[in-house]
Structure formats: C-alpha cells, structure tokens
Image (tube, rainbow, N blue to C red):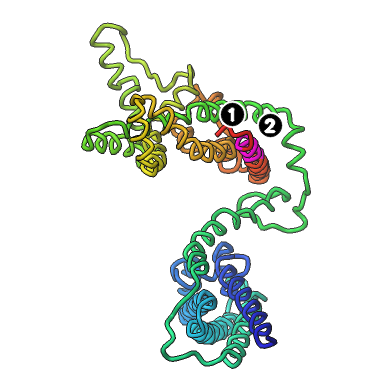
Amino acid sequence: MKVKKVTSSLYFIQLISSLIGVILLFIPAINPSRISGLIGKNLSIFTSGFFYSRLTQNFGRAFSKGWVGTMTTQVLFLSSMIVCIGFILCAVGGCLSPGCLKMKKQGNILNVVGTVLALIGAYGIRWAQIDIKGTSNPDKVQPMESNALLIFIVLAVLILLTSIFLLILLPKPDKNEKYEMETKYKLFLLIMPFLILCFVFSYLPLFGWRYAFFDYKAGDSLSLDKFVGFKWFTYLFQNKSTRGDIVRVLRNTLAMSGLGLATSWCAMAFAIFLCEIKSLRLRRFIQTITTIPNFISWVLVFAVAFSIFSTDGFLSSILIKLGVIDNGVNYLMSNNHMWLKMLAWGMWKGLGWSAIIYVAAISGIDQQLYEAATVDGASRFQRMWHITVPSLLPTFLVLLIMAVAGILSNGMDQYLVFENAYNTDTITVLDLYVYKLGINNGKIPLATVVGMAKSIVSIILLFGANRVSKIIRGNSII
C-alpha cells in the first residue's frame, strides 16, 4: 500500500513536470536559446530548434564580420532541437503511464531517454552561451544569459529521478502481458491533442491581456516604468470620441448578430426540406452546390460581388442595355440596407455548411417513428412538424446558445472587404473596430481593453443562455 502511494506521488510529479516542460517549449519569454540580442524576442525554443533561418535571420552581418561563428548557432540550433525532442519523448512516456505494467515500464524508459537528451541539449545551449560571450564586438552581438535554462534542467532532473525510482519500485511485468489501457484513458489521450491545441490557441493568447495595463507601442518592451494601471479602461469611457465609436460599433454588432440569430432557424429548415427530396442525386447536387461557398474566402466573395454590382458590373450592364438606367451604378458603394446585405451574403456563404449538422441529426432519427406516423395517417408535412422538428430542437438550442455567447464576435473578414468610405458607419463591427484600433491606429492597449471587455461579456452571455436553456428544459417545453 505504501509503495502504491509512493508510485502515485512520483507519477504525479513526473506528469506535472512533463506537462510544464512541453508548455514551456512554446513560450518565447522562457527561451534559453536566446543567447544574443540578435535573436528575436518572439522566438520560443521550439522555433529555435526547428527553424534555423528564423534563429539566424539577424546574424548576417555578425557572420560576415566574424563576430559570431556559424558553429555557435549550429550547436545552438541542434541543442534546442534535442531539448524539444527530449521533452516530447517525456510527454509520450507520460501518456503511457496510465496503461498496464508493460506500458508503464516503456513509458519510464522513454522518460529516461528523453531527459538524458534534454540534459545533453541543455549542455549544448550552455556551451553556445559561453562561446558567444567571447565575441569581438559584444555591443553589436549583445550576448545574453537567461535563467530559463535552469528551469529546463530542473524539470529534466525531476523527470529523470522519478523515472528511475519508478523503474525500481514497479514490479517486473509478465513477458506475455499485452499492451493494454483502460478505455477511459484511451479516450482521454485521443482528445488530449485537441485540448492542447485549444489551450495554445484559445487560452495562452490571454497572456496578451497584459498590454492593456501598459503604455505600449509596437516594438517597445514591457517594463514597470510604462505600467499605467487602469488608464486605458477609464479612457475608453471618459473620452467622448471613443465612447461614441463604441456605441456606434455595438449598434452595428448587435444588429447584425441579432439578424443572424433571428434567421438561425433557416439552416434547420433547409436541412429538413433537403432531406425530403426523394432523388438522391438531386439531393447530393443541391447539398454540394450550397456547401461549396463556405470554402470560398471573403476576398473572392467580394470579387464576385464586384463583378456583378460594380459600375461596370453585370447588373449595371444589363440595366443599361434594357434602358432602365443611363449610366452604371456602383451598388457596393451604397449605404442603404447594409445590415440586410451583409446578412444575405453571410447566408449565401454559410447556409449549406450550417445545415450539415442538422442533416446528420436527421439521419439519426428512428425511422420507426415515421413509419408509425404514416400508418396513423400523418401527412408528409405533419411528419416533418411533429417528428423531425422536435428531434432537431435540442441540436438547434445548443447551437443557439453558442451563437448567443458569440453575439459580439461577428468576425472581421466579411466586413473588412466590403467596407468603404460610404458604408463604414454602418458596417464597422466590434472585431473590425479592434483591428482598426490596434493595427491602423497603433492603439494596442486600447484595442486590448476592448477585446477583454468583449470576451468577458461573451462569457456572461454564455452562462445566461445556458441558464435560460435549463429553465426551458425544466418547464418541459422541449
């Protein structure tokens, strides 16, 4: 029993150390390979170890002048790669730990190999640090020494020691034992890559929220002397111009999102009528034609719109030939009914794609329900209304809740390509406004504040919509 508790504690330390090590591979702020100021601040050790051109892109003059030898950067590159491979092996070894004794043993062997490689790589990085200090022009090369290397060494030693102890404490597996793992662990390992991607692309970027508390400009470094606290938060509401922009942008955002929510049932209705088509060839043709626009970029969509609705476009040419108008009209420059125009383009592009999930849900409905309804004399429309629609409502509600949570996130691509001087007041949504603040105007802290507020409001709306959904289900409406 005591041995089991000890091994559980050792596995916990091992897994946490492996997880931290893998995450640190992608964080530029903790990059032991940044041994010179010529190496970019945005490079992680993973980038340094797998992209030699990125690592040495600023070393051209240093190489030509002989300030830095190519062997130094090559050793640094190979050492960084070895460190990355070592911790990746440790991660694989950790994934084997929930399995049988045979898998546990293989996992610990991988951990030992991985940590040895990581320590060898750390030694190579340390050698490169010492070598670059001997440069003949330290002012230009800017040799640096980071404590991040010590963090990787400590993690590698922890994993190495725990793996050795586990190899000693665990009993010897039977030679005939098969490589097996409980189903729950298999399923967790299958979803783990997606969880990691979700963390890297959805949660790790939240570290950028710190820019909202600094007086930051592109290219500057964050330091305490530029810390301004909640200055930009108060500026957002105290500045009359910014306050007016926020009101205008929110009006556009909520209006377009509201129209999207009001027409969200169209995808479900389209899927229902599509599945009612008896001809399989015709059904597949319609589904293919309506799904293809989803894979066309908004730039190409605007190109199509321009070729149809511009001054020399197809529509103007036809109307001139028919004698309806004398000169061509650029309909894209008009500000009339802009919200409805954007809704129409969005529905044309996404209706077929949005219907796929409902088509899949319809295929899962028990066909005996339709047969029983037919025997009872139900018409085709009655079967659709009393069987198909109620079966799809749970799916529709889930998608509606997600849409409500993202009511402030309309995206930017569509509105960016269709925007012009005439319609900018009615087409600028929150995402496009943040883009303009940060990229066009260089107000990165203010753009960060707006983005933070949008995320917080979206979370509140998600919980609110989820609560309403529970109340509806509790009242047996569905």
Does label 2 or label 1 sit earlier along the sequence?
A: 2
Name the spot of residue 95 as percent of width and height, x first: 51, 74
**Residue 374, can we see it?**
yes
In terms of secondary structure, where does tag 2 sit?
Answer: helix
Label 2: few (<14), some (14–19) or many (≥20) C-alpha neighbours in 10 Å? some
In terms of secondary structure, where does tag 1 sit?
Answer: helix
Q: Is residue 472 above or below residue 445?
A: above
Residues 221 and 426: in front is 426
Marks 1 and 2: in contact by CB < 8 Å?
A: no
Q: Residue at x 46, y 38 (%)?
A: 413
Q: Is residue 98 above or below residue 353?
A: below
Residue annotated with mark 1: 254
Q: Which residues are magenta?
A: 464-473
Q: Residue at x 38, y 39 (%)?
A: 362
Magenta residue check for 218: no
Three-letter code for the amino acid on which mark 1 is drawn: Leu
Q: Quadrant of residue 442?
A: top right
Residue annotated with mark 2: 242
Name the spot of residue 275 as percent of width and height, x first: 32, 34
Q: Is residue 199 above or below residue 336?
A: below
Residues 400 and 277: in front is 277
Q: Residue at x 55, y 59 (%)?
A: 200
Main structural element of the magenta stretch: helix, strand or loop? helix
Residues 142 and 32: in front is 32
Quadrant housing the C terminus: top right
Label 1: few (<14), some (14–19) or many (≥20) C-alpha neighbours in 10 Å? some
Three-letter code for the amino acid on which mark 2 is drawn: Thr
Residues 271 and 402: in front is 271
Q: Residue farthest to the front?
A: 376
Name the spot of residue 184 as percent of width and height, x first: 52, 67
Name the spot of residue 255 as percent of width and height, x first: 56, 25
